[in-house]
Image: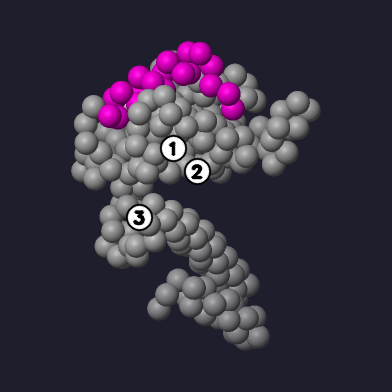
Amino acid sequence: MTRIHRSASLALAAGALLLSSCVSQQEYDKALEQADYYQTEMHELQRANGRLARQNQELMEGQGGTPVDASFIDEMSARYADMQAQLAKLSSLPEGTQRIDLAGGDYVLVVPDSIVFASGSSELSPDGQDEILRLAAEINAAPHGRIWVRGHTDSDKVVKPSTLQRFPHGNLQLSTARAVEVAAYLIEQGGVVEADVAVVGFGPHEPLKPNDSADNKRMNRRVEIYVAAD
């Protein structure tokens, strides 16, 4: 039985228990709790499926519309999960870029926003330009496959009027603009092959840490450059 069917069955079971004069209130409450649990799981699965569908579409477009087989999608999902697990282990980000090596030769370069952008800006600072050039040289030094440039922000809403004027859609737009800027500099100044690069902005929706302190928010404001081995 699938989780979705199980959720529906538990909800029906809770209704049946309510109508029964033999069931205790405790048993009824437990059935409702289980139904809520599986309903939550169902929503999480739907979100995950939607994310994978978007990644699949990006991959298809990157390969000129050639269909991608299921095994390749499974492999990329496993690589993505490995990256998330490794990032979750970070207790802090250093002042500079951190490289995390992943299974199969993939790696991710985690760039704190403070070294490449001013607050609320998507324009690379002079130090940021130097850093992206250095990272481009590192990427180009060895054969590689697809490169995903992923922008992230913390959960603080964009409120400064001048920033809102440039990014009326808030953090999601800001994170995407920053990812585009990094990707463009990698390509135009760093010599990374344009066809290898894909860009996505997540806004505050994939934090490394809860947005409950200044240090955690600093970790969440970042650009990730995921470099696949093949």
Q: Position of residue 62 (x, y in %)?
A: 39, 52
Q: Is residue 145 left or right of residue 182?
A: left
For numbered disc 3, what is the local secondary structure?
A: loop
- Provide the major secondary structure of the magenta segment: helix
User: Image quarter for residue 110?
Assistant: top left
Res 228 visible: yes
- Residue 166 in picture, x, y percent from top left: 71, 32
Q: Residues within 10 Å of mark 3 (few under 14, many from 20)?
A: few
Q: Nearer the viewer, residue 111 or 185?
A: 185
Direction from residue 58 to residue 216 in the image, left or right: right
Residue 187, image x, y percentages: 41, 32
Q: Earlier in the sequence, mark 1 or mark 2?
A: 1
The disc labelled 3 sits on which kind of residue?
A: Gln
- Vertical comparison of 83 with 34: above or below: above
Residue assigned mark 2: 200
Q: Are marks 1 and 2 in contact (CB under 8 Å)?
A: yes
Q: Marks 3 and 2, Cα distance to the nearest angstrom?
A: 17 Å
For the magenta stretch, what is the residue range? 122-140
| Dot 1 amino acid type | Val
Q: Nearer the viewer, mark 1 or mark 3?
A: 3
Single out the mark in the foreground, 3 or 2: 3
| SS at circle 1 | strand
Q: Which mark is residue 63?
A: 3
Identify residue for label 1. 149
